[in-house]
Image (cartoon, rainbow, N blue to C red):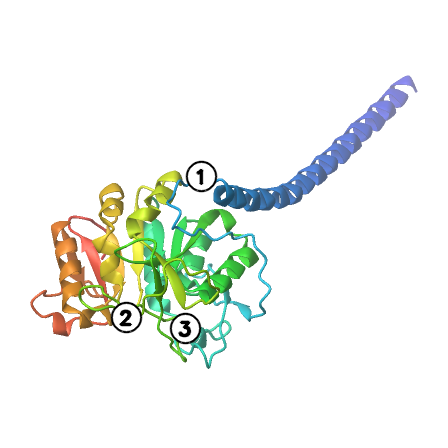
Amino acid sequence: MVSLLSRYFKLIRRMFIKTCLLVFQLAIGGLIGYYLIHNQSVFSQSNIEQNRYNIEKNTFNVSPNVHIVDLTTSIHTNFQCIKTKKLLDSLSINICLYEKEKDGIISGTFHDLTSIYEEQQVTRILELLIRHPHLHFIDIGANIGTYTMFVAALGRFVLAIDCFAPNLDRLRRAIQLTNLYNRVVLVQNALFTHSGQSLRLSVEPTNIGGQGIYLSSDHSEDNRAENNLLTTDPYIVRTITFDEVLPILVARGIRSALIKMDIEGSESFVVERGSRVFDTLDIPFIQMEWRIVRQYDDRVQVILDFFSKRSYDPITELCVLLNVNELEQWPADIYWMKRNVSNFC
């Protein structure tokens, strides 16, 4: 009888211990779940506060002419934002669009989950970044942010530069929707050979984000605005040189990056005053729009000389070497690849 009671009490004790352990595990699981949810909220808030701190305290130590956009500012304009199709089977972003009749070239190419702007080129950049995990991204002429958003969603840092405020409003809202505050620094300036000037953009009724500053060969532009003019006109933009964004990259610890350059014929101004960026960073690969800049012989020569001195070769999207003696046969988009780099083609 005693033996039977002893076994009974042992069974009761085991059941009690197991019950306590189960309750303990459930409690710990609940605490962890709460922590993760709460911590995600705190982390998101910390990203917002860090972005605001960087701007207010100018921890990047940039010149006064560099306008770093506060990504936390609320957007009061209503515009359509959509979730895109997935690239590489996993990456989808938020993108905020113009009305298609105003922007058929970029916004007009986004069709729900079926197509995106420059899908082949964006995919190529993503594949190169995956292949080279140490690389980040500089988006010169970010527009509404197709490249910026996909690269940031991949987990890389992006320095995005654009001069047109309505573009930046849409990109900033997309960043907010996707909570990518800590992966993007957004600069609102036009890149030029001189800093601190106010220039006027052209008006493109069916390509609202595709304006350019068109200058004569000696840069004595006819569309110069008053340098100290305070205006909310998005077609008047403030200039900086490319070298002026270097402190941002240094502060973020960026040592290597790919560049996409599409600024409606102003590409030569980037390299003309961008030597320090190229001398400081490892930049093995640049995607460049060639369609407009090739119309200006002086700008073309600046670009050719710059990349030749730094041992870059011009290639097509299929990695075919381009002949510098046959410029008229070059395609609308080209790539500059540094010699002796591997696994880029």
Marking on residue 19:
none
Give the image quarter of residue 162: bottom left
Pointer 2 residue: 222
State the separation of the CA atoms marked 3 and 2. Answer: 28 Å
Residue 135 appears in the rendering:
no
Pointer 1 residue: 59
First in sequence: mark 3 vs mark 1: 1
Element type at mark 3? loop
Marking on residue 106:
3
State the separation of the CA atoms marked 2 and 1. Answer: 36 Å
Position in image of residue 297 (x %, y %):
14, 68
The crowd level at tag 2 (other Cα within 10 Å; few <14, some 14-19, many 20+) is few
User: Could you tell whether 150 is left or right of 294 in the image?
Assistant: right
The crowd level at tag 3 (other Cα within 10 Å; few <14, some 14-19, many 20+) is many
The image shows residue 286, relative to residue 248, as above or below, that is below
Q: What residue type is labelled 3?
A: Ile
**Circles 3 and 2: CB distance less than 8 Å?**
no
> Which-is-in-front pick, marks 2 and 1?
2
